[in-house]
Image (spheres, rainbow, N blue to C red):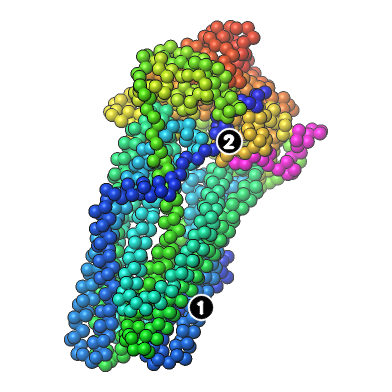
Amino acid sequence: MSQLTGGRVLRRALREQAGRITGSAVLSTGHQAGEALVPVVIGVVVDRAVGTGSPESLLLWIGVLAAVFVTLSFSFRFGARLGERAAEQAGHRLRVRVTERVLDPRGGADTGRLPGALASIATGDAGRVGMVALVLPLGVAAIAGLAVGAIALLRVSLPLGLLVLLGTPLMMLLAHLLGRPLQRRSEEEQERAAHAAGLAADLVGGLRVLKGIGAERAAADRYRLSSRAALTATLHAAGAKARHDGTLLAVNGLFLALVALLGGRLAADGDISIGALVAAVGMAQYLTGPLSLMVWVNGELAQGRGSAGRIAEVLSSPPAVGGDAELPGPVKGQVTVHGLTHAGLDGLDLDVPAGAFVGIVTTDPAHADALVACLSREREPARGTVTLDGLDLSGVDPDAVRAALLVAAHDADLFEGTLRADIDPAPTEHRVPAPRDGAGDGGRLARALAASAADEVAAALPGGLDGLVGEQGRTLSGGQRQRVALARALAADPPVLVLHEPTTAVDAVTESRIAQGVRRLREGRTTVVITTSPALLSTADTVHLVDGGAVTASGTHDQLVHEHAAYRAAVLA
Amino acid sequence: MTAPSVTVPQNAVTERRELLPVAGGRETLRALRALLRPRRGLAGAGLLVLTTATAIGLTVAPLLGHLVDLVSQGRPAGALTTPVVALAVVAVVSGALTAYGLTLVARLGEGALAELRERFLDRALRLPLGRVERAGSGDLTSRAGNDLSAVASVVRSGLPELGRSLLAIVLTLAGLGVLDWRLLLAALLAVPVQLHTVRWYAGRALPVYARQRVAVGAQQQQLLETIGGAATVRALRRRERHLDLVSGRSQEAVELTMRGVNLVTRFYARLNLAEFIGLGAVLVTGFLLVRAGEVSIGTATAAALYFHHLFTPINTALGLIDDVQAAYAALARLVGVAELPEPAAPPAPRSPADASLHADGVTHAYDADRPVLHDVSVAVPAGRRVALVGASGAGKSTLAGLVAGVHEPTAGRIRVGGVGLGDLDPAGRRAVALITQEVHVFAGTLAEDLRLAEPAAADEQLLAALDKVGAAEWVQALPDGLSTVVGEGGHRLTAAQAQQLALARLVLADPAVAVLDEATAEAGSAGARVLEASVAAALDGRTGLLVAHRLTQAALADQVVVLEGGRIVESGTHDELRAAPGGRYAELWRAWSGRRSG
């Protein structure tokens, strides 16, 4: 992949909306021209109708005024709609592209990035890049307005035109320079104020904890202090902003006085007509409109470029794992780990025969995480191999690997929706066929629920299997979530299933029931349980103890408990 | 299998939502007046200064007209000095007055806002937890977050802008009236169209924006869920499904946003019509009046220009109406909480006699027809520890919540030191602490987080508390020790560290009675063992009631109570229960310890 830059992301987003952007630019220019024409037409009505007393003239020019209004109104209406649609649609496409990249089987986009930060790139940054599609037409219209104004003024009078054309930007620059330090300070202060606002939500979010230890009074006192500090900061910021606004107003008025002085003298000397004087004064006021529009457009463009850069970084993040080969034929399920060295694992060797039920105990939980990361193809190991039926997984399409070897991580997420959809979203979807007869989808789901004791969760949930669980399953308790996640892994019925600490939040009775259930359900299918739970380990054919990053003992749970002190220490508190 | 009548509290809550109150129109207005009353002087001064600034600004047009008159009368160039100097003075004075007036308005608005948010939070923090849970956790947090910031943004930018626009409109119309009353009447022809437009818009915009906000929220939440669960999505190969969900939610938000845009553009199109009607009427009236010799051409021109200058402030003011409306709705939600009546204090508050804890014949139902506890009695003598044991949904958490006063039992009584929970004095209520499995690390430094439990604690006390629960080592390893910023946006703590922090808070709060619910459940097996030691240390010297998931905790307790289906089925010491043939606890113990005994 060639290096993806923010510029390319931005250009592609704009190219995809080229039609809408062009249409919006044409219409916005029409709107801008219409707005500029209104005072001109007012002048003409005064000159030709009010001045002459001719009703025909009045009717004619009121008609022209109506036409101008119709034009400006309609071009605004449809220009704005086209621009907004372009912006929204561009933002939407980028949002989907970022999500696509994050969910890519090869991973890597979510490495080292917090979910909140990624989500804000997919919403905030995508939106700001989209905004460019909205502001670009406005920028075009502003330039057109400036050009029209410049030509009109220069035709009236060269010195007056030059004063207005050079003076207006200079004045705006002056106002900008005067305002910048104020603006910067006020932004810092507003940030502090926003922090205090966040504190309110944070304290309320921790209400249970506060109430639990009777800290309501302390929290309210803390908030009052922070609110007062924020108040001081905002007042500083508001004062700075008020001075900035006042300065802008004064500078604007002074410039108008200057234009009036020069124009008045020219008119008094007979160099220009009175009408030209009025036009010049009017134009000096009108030009600040398109000019501040351009300043705003410029600011939005800068923001859009910054956002496009952040999106490009996500889209071009290097994949965490590679491989594109397919898995040949039906999977038997023999898993071998050889010389695996990764995040604490140090030359780990493991052999899991096809169809075996194996337990793995690590003395350091970080080693379990490392093993899970390598087996699930979330990370490429630093050294060593993982093979399935003798095939090195680093060369195989990670999606194909996961179809054959499912790793149910300890911290797996649940998703909002019905319990049924979370456990088994598409029962008819093609999957690796189960080598059992009569294993209908309904039967498989029921068996998975029973084996994981998630049937109890369904029974307690209003609506049962079709009851709703909230976002990330948060309406369920920790133990219920864990059982649903386990049911989901079992229902997928993969040739090889790796479970990582599946029962830590489950009570002892249920854990024991789950241990038996999983063992029965997975009979004849390769299953690896990485855990320190005696209940689960006692059902395994073989248990391997990983100490110091490598296997130091193997045997049944009973043997190891009796013979191995380090194992006892690891599994029995 | 669990009987369907037994359910965990979380489910009970989702079934029966009862949102927190929203203040009615009169109530909101009263609260608003109460906020503004002490700031009357500021409000009057701000209004006066801004009115003066706007009025002075309006003299620009007549001054320019005077300049034009001077030139057309053929006066020498020197005569122009006076109006030009006047223009410059007007510029400087109106600039300075505007700056001063805006500062006054900010002091008014921000001061009132600070008072409002403090009163809201103070009341919110003292709401009974059971009430907050009935409303759903999102209700209060969205008020503290979205509603506060909606009000703040209108106070900060909307109201000053609206005020200035309204002043400009009123004073310009007054200026028109001074020119000629008939010209003013002509200009007012635009008003019916504008009023109708605003009514037309407000009726349609609010529901569209409400739906749009919901759609954007749903899109945001879907993104967080999908991206946060990316590893799970990849593992289960549900990429297509999640892409469809994200894309669908996003497109839905786009369509609703576009619907809002369509409304806004139609809103401004109608306002354009009003502008044309007003401007046309002013021009035609001017034409007729000039022809009748009633006014001069200059007056007619000035009237048309005045009206033209109204376009921007009118659009600004009308465009702000829905922001103000939304902020007012947000204000009503804030006032609804802030003005909730205080719960009645016990008529004769009493201090607990000792640190004992009793639950006498407690029955509880979240839903009238779904009782989750039946006639449960537990006695914990002062300084002793009782462990609650049972399957998920047996009623352990409910009992813990009742004992800690989160909910009031449907029947029966909870006593601390012989005094019913409702009759305890404030210090007595603080004598019972509850730690749940919900861990919240407060944003700020670690020391600030801990001082919520004991504001007066010195650093040494904080470190001692951390040391007691076995957290001293990792805290010292943090980049800035106690000053490390934790919580949202700060240094991330593991689940076990966050639980230890909660226990350190408990040590600092130093309650006589501590109720611990699933404090070790989420940490994973290895972390759970470390936490068990922390829990034991934190409970040292206190009366403790703890929900035990790991039976080693039960084994260390003075008494074990086994709950099943909301009833006590066994009760006794660990050794007694373990030895009871065929007992529930004995069975649990065998299951938990695997073949340990073999």
Spatial CA span between label 1 and label 2: 55 Å
Q: Is residue A438 magenta?
A: yes
Expressed as whole percent of the image width and height from the top left, the position of residue A33 reads 45, 78
Q: Is residue A502 visible?
A: no
Q: Which residue is mark 2?
A: B15
Badge 2 crowding class, 10 Å Cα cut-off, few under 14, some 14 to 19, many 20 or more, is: few
Q: Amino acid at mark 2?
A: Glu
In the displayed structure, would residue A217 be above or below residue A247?
above
Secondary structure at badge 2 equals helix
Secondary structure at badge 1 equals helix
Q: Nearer the viewer, residue B76 or A51?
A: A51
Expressed as whole percent of the image width and height from the top left, the position of residue B537 reads 41, 19
The segment highlighted magenta reads: A416-443
Residue A71's disc is 1
Q: Is residue B25 visible?
A: yes
Identify the subunit bearing mark 2. Answer: B
Q: Is residue B177 left or right of residue A115?
A: left
Residue B64's disc is none
Q: Nearer the viewer, residue A146 or A230?
A: A230
Identify the subunit bearing mark 1. Answer: A
Work out which quarter of the rendered image holds the N terminus of chain A and state it: bottom right
